[in-house]
Amino acid sequence: MVERKFSEPTDEIVQLEPVEVRRYIAFTRWNHWFTAICFIVLMLSGFAFFHPSLYGLTALFGGGQMTRWLHPFVGIALTVSFLGMFVQLVHLNIIRREDLVWTRNIKDVITGHEERLPELGKYNFGQKTVFWGMFWLILALLITGVMMWYQYFPHLVSIETRRIAILVHAVSAVLIVLVFILHIFAALWTRGTLRAMTRGTVTGGWSWRHHRKWLRELARRQRTKPAE
Ligand code: HEM
């Protein structure tokens, strides 16, 4: 019996390994996770000061006094660490015209029809919003936090101004926690994203689907690279 064929002789699997695309080098990933740890410590210790019912959280940090001492220093560490990420990523987080088209058609993203939208670079508008949201809120938390840091800056501002600073600090903290929840939700909801920050790479399919302009640029760059 003659065996039926389903392919041309010229068809071939040229590469067994799936295409992988580097998205973050190790330095950026360490920078990110250090920032995330600082954030979680700040969030838990901050919650402890937020309402008496949450005071029990201070037990995680060795009691009330220790938590009060630690919180502002971790705030400084987070600011410095976030600044490191900011410097590396800001040029790719500038809002562009295609971001507005993307936002207007957000329902196509949610229903899995990203192919109807303009091709995107490394970040979409949602990611850029998280980036800028975190930037402005960290700045507000830093400034108001220093105003409240009575131990080291007791006469920096008047009592009235300090009261306003406390209010702005608390409101900014609530907002940044919301941004944080949005960030985690987006990272988990868009399947295949988390590995960008763990392994440093994403698949070719993920890049093609979500950040095609970015992938095209990498492919172009590699094609024009002189052969080794
Ligand atoms: C612990 C929870 C966190 C998880 C699971 C997480 C996860 C991720 C993942 C997967 C990415 C890569 C997204 C991509 O390249 O498409 C990312 C990027 C990023 N993350 Fe996080 N993250 C966390 C906490 C934080 C915190 C607390 C901050 C800042 C305070 C932060 C700031 C950023 C920034 C700035 C980027 C780069 C994206 C951009 O520039 O728009 N992350 N994160």
Image (cartoon, rainbow, N blue to C red):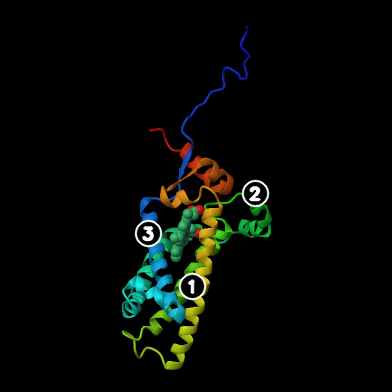
Q: Which residue is mark 2?
A: 112
When the figure is inspected, residue 59 is found, relative to residue 119, above or below; the finding is below
Residue 111 in the image: x percent, y percent?
67, 51
Q: Identify the secondary structure beneath mark 2.
A: loop
Q: Which residue is mark 3?
A: 31
Answer yes or no: is residue 142 visible. Answer: no
Alpha carbon separation for disc pair 3 and 2: 31 Å
Q: Which residue is mark 1?
A: 137
Quarter of image, res 158: bottom left
Whether residues under marks 3 and 2 lie with C-beta atoms below 8 angstroms apart, the answer is no
Q: Which of these two is toward me, 141 or 67?
A: 67
Could you classify mark 1 by the number of other residues whose Cα lies within 10 Å: few (under 14), some (14-19), or many (20 or more)?
many
Looking at the image, is mark 3 or mark 2 nearer the viewer? 2
Whether residues under marks 2 and 1 lie with C-beta atoms below 8 angstroms apart, the answer is no
When the figure is inspected, residue 173 is found, relative to residue 34, above or below; the finding is below
Q: Residue at x 58, y 45 (%)?
A: 209
Q: Identify the secondary structure beneath mark 3.
A: helix
